Image (cartoon, rainbow, N blue to C red):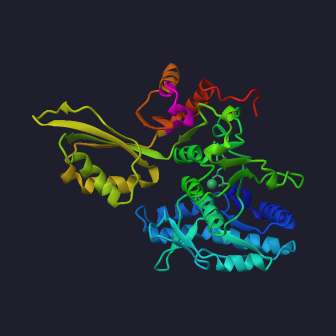
């Protein structure tokens, strides 16, 4: 069982999580619980790091931000003990949960489950802070924002759990963020592949890596609500959304478009007047790669004659907003080698994506998207596609409108407002 930040926000809620865990244990299940920090806490800790220095050392950032989950894991163990459930917490370094040393976005390698297995066998509930691990040289690491989902799937895989239930503040995965579109529909099932794509383009209900890991390790994942009373259906009756293999979806359940996601956490960078010659693009992206910065959308405009005699081109791409200061620094340091004119950046952009395996066999998905946005006067600044996804970059202020009109255009609206 994994509980997210809203579910852990305050002692009252932690008590209700404890009651939920007790109910599952009383039904005869052995339970390991992975917890997030209280809602808002990780943001607060990140804020302290930025305030201390905008170019903070990621190793020390991890020491700071991992603290939120340490607190909630201890509190849940206390709350469980208080209602007669034997429980103890196991911090990332105590198990250990081994990760690589990509601080602030570390990947889990192996998890030693010996202590967990023994704890469960002795009738205890094991409480594990999400989001954290330990590097080979013993330093605290964190897994990237939203990483508790990945901790939960990794623990479930390592312990060979029957299921990994992700309890959150919505009762499943919807056709789009139900906070933006009240007419979004809850999906009973969604394939690993589509969930992976949805998560990677901004549906933050599950961290992308958690879905990739679940797919690879064949972990059965269910997303369900933690905000239900004692009379709620048991998790075994699958009241939420199951993430399943494609073979588990009946033909009649298949949709052309499964969902729409948005992401406001990208920033757009344009380098003007880049020399149009072999190796030019490499000279831009090598320093970014070396700084461990993920580049997403890339467009290179048609070469044009600049004032001189050599041809030049503008290169536009997006990076995570959080990495913008470091990106600018890396690019300015490589300015001579790249030979660009100006560096223009814009954080007021949003990426809107439509996802569905149906687009493999159906034409016209992208054109519906462009027509729908055009009719609303929404300008498209960049486009990228994959086999099962089309993404566009637009002005941030138009996010909600774009998601709503696309949701309607692809026939995803529920009959009645939820
Ligand atoms: P937690 O703290 O439990 O990890 P998150 O805030 O990370 O919760 O994720 C849950 C949120 O994901 C929901 O409150 C919802 O606003 C958002 N969300 C975005 N896209 C979707 C979607 N397609 N279906 C359900 N929720 C979504
Ligand atoms: N607390 C971490 C975050 O806010 C991890 C998580 O909640 O999944 O990103
Ligand atoms: Mg989350």
Q: Quadrant of the C terminus?
A: top right
Quadrant in the picture for residue 17: bottom right
Seen in the picture, residue 87 relative to 231 is either above or below; the reply is: below
Between 386 and 201, the one nearer to me in the picture: 386
Q: How many marks?
A: 0
Taking the image as shown, residue 258 lies to the left or right of residue 318, namely: right
Q: Position of residue 44 (x, y in %)?
A: 58, 61
Q: Can residue 9 be spotted in the picture?
A: no
Q: Is residue 43 magenta?
A: no
Q: Position of residue 9 (x, y in %)?
A: 72, 60
Taking the image as shown, residue 223 lies to the left or right of residue 216, namely: right
Seen in the picture, residue 102 relative to 221 is either above or below; the reply is: below
Between 154 and 56, the one nearer to me in the picture: 154
* Residue displayed at 66% across by 62% down: 36
Q: Is residue 352 magenta?
A: yes
* Residue displayed at 45% across by 50% down: 321
Q: Position of residue 413 (x, y in %)?
A: 68, 28
Q: Single out the residue that lies furthest toward the top.
A: 375
Between 109 and 304, the one nearer to me in the picture: 109
The part of the chain drawn in magenta is: 351-366
Q: Splitting the image into four quadrants, where does ligand 3 fall?
A: bottom right
Q: Can residue 352 be spotted in the picture?
A: yes
* Residue displayed at 62% across by 58% down: 149
Q: Single out the residue that lies furthest toward the left.
A: 309
Q: Position of residue 132 (x, y in %)?
A: 57, 69
Q: Quadrant of the N terminus?
A: bottom right
């Amino acid at each position: 069982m994994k509980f997210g930040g809203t579910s852990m926000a305050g002692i009252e809620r932690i008590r209700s999580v404890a009651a939920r865990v007790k109910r599952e244990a009383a039904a005869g299940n052995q339970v390991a619980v992975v917890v997030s920090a209280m809602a808002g806490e990780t943001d607060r800790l990140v804020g302290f790091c930025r305030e201390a220095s905008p170019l903070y050392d990621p190793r020390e950032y991890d020491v700071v931000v991992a603290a939120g989950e340490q607190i909630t894991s201890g509190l849940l163990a206390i709350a469980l003990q208080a209602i007669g459930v034997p429980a103890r917490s196991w911090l990332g370094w105590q198990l250990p949960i081994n990760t690589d040393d990509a601080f602030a976005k570390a990947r889990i390698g192996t998890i030693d489950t010996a202590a967990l297995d023994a704890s469960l066998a002795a009738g205890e509930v094991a409480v594990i802070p999400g989001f954290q691990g330990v590097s080979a040289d013993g330093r605290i690491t964190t897994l990237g924002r939203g990483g508790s989902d990945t901790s939960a799937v990794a623990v479930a895989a390592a312990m060979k759990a029957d299921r990994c239930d992700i309890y959150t503040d919505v009762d499943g995965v919807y056709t789009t963020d139900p906070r933006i579109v009240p007419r979004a529909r809850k999906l009973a099932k969604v394939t690993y592949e589509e969930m992976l794509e949805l998560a990677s383009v901004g549906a933050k209900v599950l961290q992308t890596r958690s879905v990739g890991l679940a797919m690879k390790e064949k972990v059965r994942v269910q997303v369900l609500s933690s905000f239900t009373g004692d009379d709620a259906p048991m998790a075994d009756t699958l009241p939420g959304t199951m993430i399943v293999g494609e073979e588990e979806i009946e033909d009649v359940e298949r949709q052309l478009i499964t969902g729409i996601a948005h992401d406001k956490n990208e920033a757009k960078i344009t380098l003007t007047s880049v020399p149009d010659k072999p190796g030019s693009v490499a000279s831009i992206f090598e320093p970014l790669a070396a700084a461990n910065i993920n580049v997403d959308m890339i467009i290179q405009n048609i070469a044009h004659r600049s004032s001189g005699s050599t041809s030049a081109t503008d290169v536009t791409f997006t990076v995570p907003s959080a990495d913008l200061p470091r990106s600018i620094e890396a690019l300015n340091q490589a300015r001579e080698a790249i030979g660009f004119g100006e560096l223009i950046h814009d954080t007021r952009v949003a990426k809107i994506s439509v996802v569905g395996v149906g687009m493999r066999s159906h034409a016209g998905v992208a054109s519906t998207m462009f027509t729908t946005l055009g009719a609303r006067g929404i300008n498209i600044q960049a486009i990228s596609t994959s086999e099962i996804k089309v993404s566009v970059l637009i002005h941030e202020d138009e996010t909600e409108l774009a998601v709503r009109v696309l949701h309607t255009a692809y026939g995803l609206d529920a009959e009645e407002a939820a």
